[in-house]
């Protein structure tokens, strides 16, 4: 295509582009009402009153330019001719051309995609499960119905496409939200609470329904039912093709359906050396929660008055803007950045004595001033050793002692937290009791490591802390009981689990000598859900 083929987009860069866009949207609205032709006065009346030109002739000029660019077509208006003079008078009616309609459709798609606010669609997961079950029922029939197969696959791919596109858009908008700096603190805190609840709800649905979808996809593929269903859908799609093109159209349609199914399977099912997109999305959503909390911490620190470099530069910029004249701005620049004249070279004692006896005015040009006599050692080696006593060595014993005390205190707090969490065997989470702040923080890190390894259908998982000092074994229960862990900040509650925490820093002998905890009956594990813990405040 040549550049002239894109002339219907020329009105986007014209000086009066907003008016051109309004006129084109007027023609699109008229087309939806089955109005084919519009007169200049009709277009003028349909424009917004706030942006309508004062002179109606301006609309006629806009219409003529759109005709020139190929967006509109002008035809003589003979319907209102009542005299010979009217016949020779310039009157036109206008309608959209194919090129103009295509350009507006492209611009409408651009505006829609650009303004789309992504969302994590938990309802789409339920719809995908429903359609996969419908495909299993259809595939079990001796002769699957062609129309039912096509409809089920069409709805399945449509819902999956919406889910993937919206998830991608949502994660992009979420990252932009995390990167916000100049935002109202109260508004962001309120939005943060709703967003975290939204993320947690979607992650729970993705854990449960994602595993169910993966099982349904595996069941269809293991029984080799996918290929025949895709061929039926391709045959239905190519049914209206010309007889000589029927075979090629069916092959093209089958390739398209196979690619769609492959994308769906790879989104929910992990392969060898490859994680599924659902797992990546879950990890990204889980990782965004601590990032949001970090933004909240920064906002709280800024609200509390803690200074940072960006705040200092903004304050300095405000001072520059409020300075009365350039002289004050230059003084502010020198004070802020410490930039002074270049008369700071180190010289010897004789030069200093000479300059003290006969000072050089600061206004003397460099070319006319007496030269500075610099020490040969400075010129040769780049360093100058001053005469006099050497500097005293700073005594940092007190600072080292304070740091050692802080390190010892933190080590003792960590040791007490580990001792508090060690269970000595499997116990119920509900019997863990209350936890202080250090022990609760360590417990949350251990629980997060365990949940990170949880997969759909998992009964028991084992994880090791990041520093290798502790090990946690988590087992889901099926008795419907709940657990509460009381902390200084509130109550941490959720479904009860079996939990076994081991301190790996303790030797095997010491671990064996430790008194075992009271025996706890082990109920039947649950297989359908992963652990879900909520925090009540």
Image (spheres, rainbow, N blue to C red):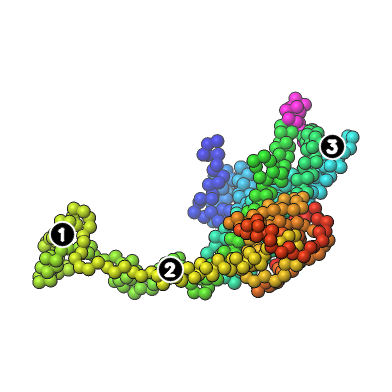
**Whole-percent x, y for residue 297 in the image:** 56, 68
Percent across and percent down for residue 226 are: 79, 37
- Name the side, left or right, on which 268 lies relative to 358: right
User: Can residue 2 be seen in the rendering of this structure?
Assistant: yes
Tell me which segment is drawn in magenta. Answer: 237-251
Q: Which comes sooner in the sequence, label 3 or label 1?
A: 3
Expressed as whole percent of the image width and height from the top left, the position of residue 182 reads: 52, 66
Residue at image point 65% right, 60% down: 510
Residue lying furthest top = 244
Q: In which quarter of the image is residue 480?
A: bottom right
Q: Quadrant of residue 243?
A: top right
Whether residue 429 can be seen here: no
Q: Residue 438's image quarter?
A: bottom right
Mark 3 to mark 2 CA distance (whole Å): 80 Å
Q: Residue 387 carries which label?
A: none
Residue at label 3? 146
Q: Is residue 520 above or below residue 25?
A: below
Quadrant location of the N terminus?
top right
- Disc 2 marks which residue? 400
**Where, quadrant-wise, is the C terminus in this rendering?**
bottom right
Residue 245 belongs to the span the image colors magenta: yes
């Amino acid at each position: 295509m040549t550049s002239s083929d894109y002339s219907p987009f020329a009105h986007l860069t014209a000086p009066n582009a907003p008016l051109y866009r309004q006129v084109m949207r007027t023609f699109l609205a008229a087309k939806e009402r089955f109005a084919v032709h519009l007169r200049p006065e009709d277009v003028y009346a349909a424009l917004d009153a706030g942006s309508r030109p004062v002179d109606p002739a301006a609309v006629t000029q806009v219409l003529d330019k759109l005709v020139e660019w190929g967006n509109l077509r002008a035809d003589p208006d003979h319907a209102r001719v009542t005299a010979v003079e009217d016949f020779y008078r310039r009157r036109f009616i206008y309608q959209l051309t194919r090129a103009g309609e295509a350009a507006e459709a492209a611009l409408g798609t651009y505006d829609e995609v650009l303004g789309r606010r992504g969302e994590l669609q938990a309802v789409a997961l339920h719809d995908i499960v429903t359609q996969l079950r419908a495909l299993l029922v259809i595939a079990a029939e001796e002769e699957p119905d062609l129309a039912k197969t096509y409809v089920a696959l069409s709805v399945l791919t449509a819902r999956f496409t919406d889910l993937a596109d919206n998830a991608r858009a949502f994660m992009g908008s979420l990252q932009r939200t995390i990167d916000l700096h100049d935002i109202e603190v109260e508004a962001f805190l309120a939005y943060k609470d709703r967003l975290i609840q939204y993320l947690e709800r979607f992650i729970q649905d993705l854990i449960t329904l994602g595993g169910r979808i993966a099982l349904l996809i595996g069941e269809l593929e293991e029984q080799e039912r996918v290929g025949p269903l895709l061929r039926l859908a391709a045959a239905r799609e190519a049914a209206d093709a010309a007889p000589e093109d029927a075979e090629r159209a069916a092959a093209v349609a089958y390739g398209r359906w196979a690619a769609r199914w492959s994308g769906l399977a790879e989104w929910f099912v992990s392969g060898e050396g490859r994680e599924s997109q659902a797992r990546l999305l879950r990890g990204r959503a889980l990782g965004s929660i601590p990032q949001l909390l970090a933004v909240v911490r920064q906002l709280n620190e800024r609200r509390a008055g803690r200074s940072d470099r960006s705040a200092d530069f903004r304050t300095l910029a405000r001072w520059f803007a409020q300075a009365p004249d350039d002289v004050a701005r230059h003084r502010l620049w020198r004070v802020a950045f410490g930039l002074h004249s270049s008369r700071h070279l180190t010289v010897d004692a004789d030069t200093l004595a000479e300059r003290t006896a006969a000072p050089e005015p600061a206004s003397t040009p460099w070319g006319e001033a007496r030269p500075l006599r610099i020490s040969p050692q400075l010129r040769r080696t780049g360093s100058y050793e001053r005469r006099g006593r050497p500097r005293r060595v700073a005594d940092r014993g007190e600072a080292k002692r304070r740091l050692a005390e802080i390190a010892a205190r933190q080590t003792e707090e960590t040791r007490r937290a580990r001792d508090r969490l060690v269970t000595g065997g499997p116990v119920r989470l509900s019997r863990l009791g209350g936890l202080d702040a250090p022990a609760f923080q360590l417990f949350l890190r251990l629980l997060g490591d365990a949940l990170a390894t949880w997969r759909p259908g998992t009964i028991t998982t084992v994880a090791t802390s990041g520093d290798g000092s502790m090990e946690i074994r988590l087992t889901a229960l099926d008795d419907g009981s709940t657990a509460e862990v009381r902390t200084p900040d509130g109550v941490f509650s959720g479904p009860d689990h079996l939990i076994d925490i081991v301190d790996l820093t303790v030797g095997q002998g010491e671990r064996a000598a430790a008194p075992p905890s009271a025996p706890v009956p082990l109920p039947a594990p649950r297989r359908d859900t992963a652990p879900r813990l909520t925090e009540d405040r």
